[in-house]
Image (cartoon, rainbow, N blue to C red):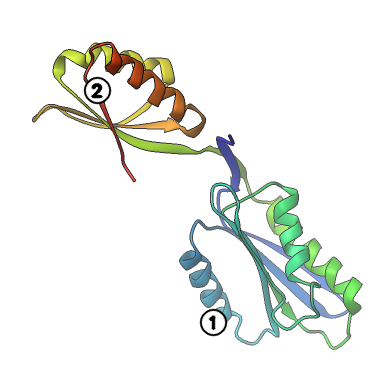
């Protein structure tokens, strides 16, 4: 099971010029489709006089939400080359937009593919790529006399504690790396089968 992914940290830009045409690329970290739409709307307003706003994105921790858009350029000459640069770096939660100002001379499909690929690459090359763990959140509920058992579980599985409440029973909010989720569930089952009382709730 994949327990991490790679993404970019901030906004970055790239620029490519060919036969008078100018290709301005922007790379953004994005985690939702709403973020993608906001970024695209903002760029279309700022660069309203540009002929094309081509883009590609991959979203989701497992990189399953994918789209490439040619925005009026010949099929597969813009969006796919941009998408290829995101994929070649094994990135997700990433949007790259390339804005084209037409210079009066047609570049041909191969020229367009090179231009969109190069400008997207420029924008990604100057960004910072980070590795992020895929964690699952849960809530542990237990009586106070189970505290030692719970803290041993936290230590053994390297759980991250996000919050604790001891006012009405003991409640602990934790995060576990997804590849260890089943191990945690199994350990709790074994504990409870031997007389312990620790409840596990998903915190979606």
Locate residue 132: give its quadrant.
top right
Residue 67: % across, % down: 64, 66
* Residue tagged 1: 45
Question: In this orientation, which residue lies closer to the viewer: 85 or 26?
Answer: 85
Q: Is residue 137 left or right of residue 82?
A: left
- Residue in the image at 52% along x and 75% along y: 42
Residue 178: % across, % down: 48, 34
- Marks 2, 1: nearer the viewer: 2
Which element type, helix, strand or loop, lies under badge 2?
loop
Mark 2 to mark 1 CA distance (whole Å): 54 Å
Q: Is residue 107 above or below residue 35?
A: below
How crowded pointer 1 is (Cα within 10 Å; few <14, some 14-19, many 20+) is rated as: few
- Residue in the image at 60% along x and 54% along y: 64
How crowded pointer 2 is (Cα within 10 Å; few <14, some 14-19, many 20+) is rated as: some
Question: In this orientation, which residue lies closer to the viewer: 59 or 6?
Answer: 59
Could one spot residue 97 in this view of the protein?
no
Q: Is residue 147 above or below residue 79?
A: above
Residue 104: % across, % down: 85, 88
Tell me whether the residue at label 2 lies in contact with that at label 1, contact meaning CB atoms closer than 8 angstroms: no
Could one spot residue 62 in this view of the protein?
yes
Residue 70: % across, % down: 72, 76
Q: Quadrant of the N terminus?
A: top right
Q: Is residue 74 above or below residue 159?
A: below
- Residue in the image at 84% along x and 69% along y: 113
* Residue tagged 2: 198
């Amino acid at each position: 099971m994949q327990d991490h992914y790679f993404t970019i940290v901030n906004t970055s830009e790239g620029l490519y010029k060919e036969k008078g045409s100018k290709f301005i690329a922007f790379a953004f970290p994005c985690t939702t489709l709403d973020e993608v739409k906001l970024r695209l709307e903002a760029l279309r307003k700022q660069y309203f006089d540009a002929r094309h706003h081509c883009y590609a994105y991959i979203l989701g921790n497992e990189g399953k939400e994918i789209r490439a858009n040619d925005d009026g350029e010949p099929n597969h000459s813009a969006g796919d080359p941009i998408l290829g640069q995101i994929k070649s770096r094994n990135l997700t939660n990433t949007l790259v937009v390339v804005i084209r100002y037409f210079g009066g001379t047609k570049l041909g499909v191969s020229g367009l593919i090179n231009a969109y690929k190069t400008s997207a690459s420029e924008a990604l090359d100057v960004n910072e790529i980070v590795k992020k763990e895929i964690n699952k959140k849960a809530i542990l509920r237990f009586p106070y006399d189970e505290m030692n058992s719970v803290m041993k579980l936290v230590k053994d599985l390297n759980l991250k504690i996000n919050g604790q409440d001891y006012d009405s029973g003991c409640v602990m909010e934790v995060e576990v790396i997804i590849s260890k989720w089943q191990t945690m569930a199994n350990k709790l089952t074994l504990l409870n089968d031997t007389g312990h009382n620790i409840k596990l709730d998903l915190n979606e």
